[in-house]
Amino acid sequence: MDIEFFANKLQELWLLAQSQIGEPATYIQAGIIIASYFVAYWIYAKTVKKSLLANKKPISIEHPLSNILYRLGSIVYPLVAIVLLRISLSVGESALYPVWLINAALTIAVLLFFYSIIKEFVSSTFMSTLFRWIGLPILLLHLLGVLPVFIKALEEISLTVGNIQVTLYGLTRVLFFGALLFWLGRASNNVGKDIIRSQHKLDISTREVFTKLFEVGLFSIVFILLLNIMGVNLTALAVFGGAVGVGLGLGLQSIASNFISGIIILLDKSLTIGDFVELEDGKKGFVREFKMRHAVLETYDGKDILVPNENFISSLLINWTHKDPKQRYRVDFSVAYATDVRAMVEIIKEAVAEHPQVISGMDVPFEERPDCEIDSFGDNGVNMFIEFWIEGIDDGKNRVGGDLLLIILETLKANDISIPFPQREVTVLNQGFVK
């Protein structure tokens, strides 16, 4: 019966086209369609095309909205054409004038418009295929006015499990709109976080707080909409909320603690993106990202350490660069006891100060200039050390310690200053043999 309905519908359209093909009204409608597209292009050329929005493709480092507006500019032309065709269709219907060709042109224009949206905005291969092969046919059925018949046919195919009846239409609706909602949620989440993080008027901690709240709020809305699509009574969420509360108090306590700890860290600004921190167990790294449950530390050897947010509050934490990126380090070495230590100290300080990454100069406070001192008197020589300040951490690009050891060694050799090595005096006592 449904197949006959679709066949009859197509036959009616074909007969209508054959009967109207030679009528003057058909040529008038064709002229209106062509004029609508010309006017739409004129509006597009006078507005969008003359602006930088359509002529300058934004680079990746620009504001996220620039890329969105650039893509929106490419669909203004077909959108204006659809609006003009819809106006022409309404006017023709009000005047009881034949508008079948305009209606067909509008249907094709809407399909092409949504196809261009899929092409411009959907980068996921799976979602693009889903929209093209399922979404566009559904849209076509809706525009032709036969979607209710198609839905009725799907509802007749059902499976009963106990007291629950599952129809093919309900399953298809949940799968399609569920995939659509999660894709929209993820895409909106990425765009929203990029927009929030590009607000440089706000400090990093505030941006991260808003980013986290935006992420939680967005996925909560997606979850509620998905429940509504599934036909779940939203009043049941009160019972669900009570169950979640019990779960948080028992099995989900750690997850809730980490989430709340992350919010506290971002609000009190004790830890920000880019800080170099050292954990209680000795692990070190740069804070690169805050997640809902953990923070990501990037080490100098290319590893990512996932640290639960609760650890930053409940355990000892050393933040090396939170207040000041300048750090003080020291290098140890030894010289022989016969060395003129006073002269050697000045030579070493001058040599170390010449390193480009060591903070030095007369404009630098005295306490931040390189300083060489005696550490202790060793068994074989005088143990010395030199303290210095640098910008950043002594690792990665700032591997200053190894360079200074080489500079000190070369400087000592150039000035004939010997480096002691372990020596032992052995005394042999000849007491003879006892018979």
Image (spheres, rainbow, N blue to C red):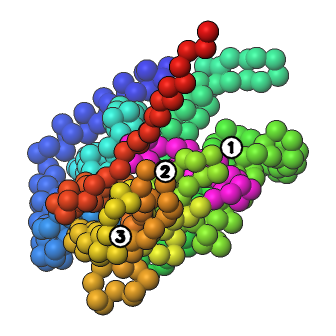
Identified by mark 3, the residue type is Val
* Residue named by callout 2: 379
Q: Residues within 10 Å of mark 1 (few under 14, many from 20)?
A: some
- Identify the element where label 1 is drawn: helix
The image shows residue 64 at horizontal and vertical percentages of: 34, 64
In reply to whether residue 304 is colored magenta, the answer given is: yes
Observer-nearest residue: 307 or 4? 307
Q: Residues within 10 Å of mark 3 (few under 14, many from 20)?
A: some
Q: Identify the magenta region.
A: 293-317
- Dot 2 or dot 1: first in sequence order is 1
Identified by mark 2, the residue type is Asp
- Dot 3 or dot 1: first in sequence order is 1
* Residue, far front: 435
Tell me where residue 16 sits by quadrant: top left
Identified by mark 1, the residue type is Leu
Tell me where residue 317 sits by quadrant: bottom right
The quarter of the picture where the C terminus appears is: top right
- Tell me the number on the disc at residue 227: 1
- Residue visible at 60% across and 52% down in the picture: 279
In reply to whether residue 185 is colored magenta, the answer given is: no
Q: Are marks 3 and 1 in contact (CB under 8 Å)?
A: no
Horizontal arrangement in the rendering, residue 198 relative to residue 295 (left or right): left
The image shows residue 195 at horizontal and vertical percentages of: 42, 67
- Dot 2 or dot 3: first in sequence order is 3
Q: Depth-wise, is mark 3 or mark 1 nearer the camera? A: 3
Q: Residues within 10 Å of mark 2 (few under 14, many from 20)?
A: few
Q: Depth-wise, is mark 2 or mark 1 nearer the camera? A: 2
The image shows residue 315 at horizontal and vertical percentages of: 71, 55
